[in-house]
Amino acid sequence: MDPTLSWSGSSSTGDMDIEYGVEASALPTTDIASLPRKVFGTVKTSVAGWGVSAGATKTMATGATDITVDASNDDADLSVQVVATADGGVDTISATKGIDIDGASLTITPTYSVATEDADVVVAYDNGDTNVELTASADSQEVVVTHDMGDTSIQLTASKDSQEVVVDHSMGDTSVKLTASADGQEVTISQAIDDANTISPTINSDGDISVAWSRDLGDDNSLTATVKPDDSIAVEWKDDNWTANIDAGLSGTDISGLSISAKRDVTF
């Protein structure tokens, strides 16, 4: 097993919000410098009506540093994002512009890759009950249509290579979600056992089965365990400002590839 431990926190100072963390090896070692695997941090502030954030993630094994800069202006309904690396410069540039159309919203998001010189645009329309999203580039096009009918929602995704339909229906304590495409079908049935416990088995057309159990611990706290036989096991525990995740591979009763992460929101 090669377990990892992730820790993150947040704080505020003046008009800046800071988020930070580290991902480290949980294996015993005498070389403290070999423990960190990733170090990351983000700073958020406001400048002349623009909300600006800058974040960096350094991967210790490769020495690569990924940088993301976001700027948004609510009055203009405009946001811009730049993704770069410390040694390679700017990778992608994207912008999102929102337009109000008689109460409905239209957003246009062009993206340009400096590395590959590829460009694409995403156009999304939302009037409340119906959402349409079109993604287009020189090589491909995809459209996603979502319609809400109260207890039932339908989502259709279509491209030149594939089509998929997702139907989600709720009936009191029971909800059913069906996903169907040319390659396979999957159904999830969620049943509330009582006010605190919910069981959600999932089965697909290949015969793969998974079962999720969720327990409401009160005050927005919860414990969720998901088991996929001969595949994986995952546990998520939310307790106040803490969120802990345990993920591992599962083969019969053998557990491998254990990963542990913990996160806490801290305000000074």
Image (cartoon, helix red, strand yellow):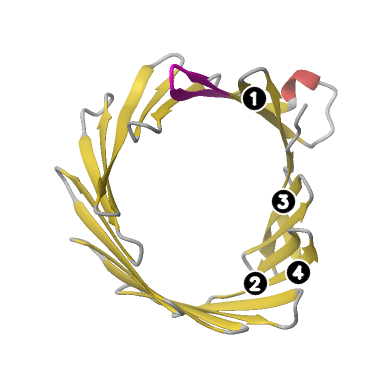
In percent of width and height, residue 241 lies at 76, 45
The residue beneath circle 3 is 245
Tell me the CA gap for discs 3 and 2. Answer: 19 Å
Question: In the figure, 10 relative to 130: above or below?
Answer: above
Left or right position of 65 against 48: right
Q: Are marks 4 and 3 in contact (CB under 8 Å)?
A: no
Question: Magenta residues, as a range?
Answer: 44-57
Q: Residue furthest front?
A: 102
Secondary structure beneath label 2 = loop
Left or right position of 107 against 252: left
Question: In the figure, 50 relative to 149: above or below?
Answer: above
The residue located at (31%, 27%) in the rendering is 93
The residue beneath circle 1 is 18
N-term mark: 2 or 4? 4
The residue beneath circle 4 is 215
Name the amino acid, label 2: Pro
The residue beneath circle 2 is 229
Tell me the CA gap for discs 2 and 1. Answer: 40 Å
Residue 173 or 38: which is nearer the viewer? 173
Tell me the CA gap for discs 2 and 4. Answer: 21 Å
Magenta segment main secondary structure: strand
Q: Are marks 2 and 4 in contact (CB under 8 Å)?
A: no
Q: Are marks 3 and 2 in contact (CB under 8 Å)?
A: no
N-term mark: 4 or 1? 1
Q: Nearer the viewer, mark 4 or mark 1?
A: 1
Question: In the figure, 257 relative to 166: above or below?
Answer: above
The residue located at (80%, 20%) in the rendering is 31
In percent of width and height, residue 233 lies at 69, 62
